[in-house]
Image: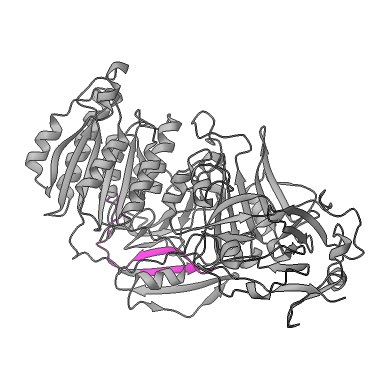
Amino acid sequence: MGRHRRRAAIATAGATMLIAGLATGLSPNGSATAADAAPPVVFVLDASGSMVRETSPGVSRMDAAKQAVTSTLANLQDGTETGVLVFGTGTGNDPSEQTAGCSDVTTLSALAPVDTTTLDAAIAGIQPSGYTPISAALREAYAMLPAGEAGSVVLLSDGVDTCAPPSSCEVAAELHAQNPLIDINVVAFAVDDDEAARQQMTCIGGVGGGISSTATDLTQLTAQLRAAAGDGTALGTSGMNDITLGMTLDEVRHAIDGASVSEPSTEDGVEIIYVDCSWGRIELHDGRVYSITPTDDDVTTADGLAPGDPVSEVEALYGDPVDGGVNADGTLTYVYQLTAGGTAGYRVDADSATRSVQRIILCRCVPISAISSAYSDWQIDADGVGPLQLGMSLAAARAAAPSLGSVGTSAYWTISDAAGVWLDATFSDDRLISIRVRDPRSVSGDLSTNGVSYPSINGIRFGDSMSTVLSAYPGGMYYRNYAGGMSDYVVTDRSGHVLTFSPTGGTSSSTASFADSIRAGFLSAVTVEDATATRGSTVSTSPTASASASPTASASIEGLPSELDGEWCSSSGDECVSFPDLAEQFPNAWVHSSEASPSGVTRYVICLDADLGDSSCTTAMTMYLDYFPVGVSWDCETDGAGDFFSTCNPDYTSEHDTSQVRLVKQLNHQMEDYYADAHPLYRVD
């Protein structure tokens, strides 16, 4: 079976009200075996004008690409359905030829059992000359593969799509969303000095559900191309047999039938669980996959490394080890980092006498100190940002990121640059619970202004289209943060770790659906949080009364209009809100804001306790109250469910007496496809 990225269902979400968007479940899928037929693969080769440049004396990029592709085709499993496309051979790269050049995609071989003799001759005849229509080529490659079946596209390119817009990253996300069983795997060749090309190649692989790798010479190119064309049964840089680093135990159980799961044990404060299956052992640390160890000595890595190979071959691909040395028994153990900004690596056990590989383990074992200090190398995922990982102590976080600076409270730490603060880290009980990364500048999606200096997520950078985010992370929820007046997009994994994507430049949510509003924007911020600790996103506030509040201050809650003070209960008396009691329980509570709607309902946002610092509180410490004056009605199906929820459940419309003023204490989260109504409360004193 091919590599399949799973998107976890929504479990919970951040601040205030979640609007529309249904959670999508995980697709059942067993693990692959060597006996499975290899999925079909389509190779897409770049033959644009830049491929004439030399990669070594007398050897052009195109020469190296031809050799690597020919070698990879010969290495495919017999009978593998294979197609080959090439772009850039039919025109030059003069501006007058751009229209023709941007549709210049040629089929060297339609999808058929691999025939190396015919393909080798066709590949040998490629002459690079034209434009780089990556998006058009990806669309043609997807069209060649069977709909609704597993398969892969392998792109080899050295540059940026010269036919955008739309960006090739956005097109890759769109295609993968249409058929998640097809992965797009990318090998970027000789792009080390081209940040734009490197970022685009990373994004295509990231949002396309596959892998993205780089190569600088023929040896690396051949190895990485073979890895990209692999069937997933090899040990890849992210996982093996549909098990990936960072998965939760539930996701592992879902992917493997009949696995044996050990009882948890604790070592140095870390909970460890082992999962044994027919092909290997999976080790989880604190509920997430930490390492994957194949038990079959014949299993190779996706780039061809295997037990018995010299350690020098590992170092030719991944450089010097970042950790390790001589063990007590005289054997060698080395850790090789797979990406500059991540903790994933290969742990290699080797014989000290022959320096030959004995075992290769994929793990999250790269020391924090080895992670690049260049912020643009840092990767954002559901567990953290670069070296900053959720659950870290403050001391560990400051050691991992020395640039963290305090803002006057032990709860908040930030990283800034000349443009302003771009990272906020929030701690509770000496534990990192939330990280927010944002581009402090005004971004437009143009590469000249997007966040190339800041961390990225699956190759997506600040300033990229939110439609790319939505395609790359389907099944999320849209929500409106009434306290902040924003609409965001939220995805959550099964362990309760939340990714919140915040757009800028979208359409107004008053004239478009929240989904359309978000999709029209550009990514401006990403928040990673442990919802089991935060129970929602942070509501950043200042302890001052809203300008629209009554000038007559309440004796109970700072900034609360006096006409709201006192006790309010439902008609049955089963549910009550007493502001004097709240003030006694939360003496520092204040009204953050109030907002009147066109219907006449006023929403009050109350921060009960600044549990994250002097001026901020979590959603768990926030109360949302709607005040209904006399004569203002409520229809749950229209005013609550609207166009975004299927219905109201429960529906308390009939309990509203419009001859009286009412308060409704809204739920902090709407997490279902239906709208959960709340009882109207009436003054009782």
User: What percent of the width, then of the height, locates residue 16?
Assistant: 64, 60
- Seen at 30% across and 22% down, the residue is 98
Give left or right: position of 515 versus 162. right
Give left or right: position of 619 versus 269. right
- Seen at 24% across and 19% down, the residue is 92
User: Is residue 13 among what the camera can see?
Assistant: no
* Quarter where residue 109 is shown: top left
Q: Is residue 196 above or below residue 177?
A: above
Q: Nearer the viewer, residue 151 or 64?
A: 151
User: What percent of the width, then of the height, locates residue 102?
Assistant: 28, 28
Q: Is residue 582 magenta?
A: no
* Quarter where residue 282 is shown: bottom left
User: What percent of the width, then of the height, locates residue 581?
Assistant: 85, 73
Start-end of magenta stretch: 281-306
Colour setting: one colour
Q: Is residue 154 above or below residue 580?
A: above
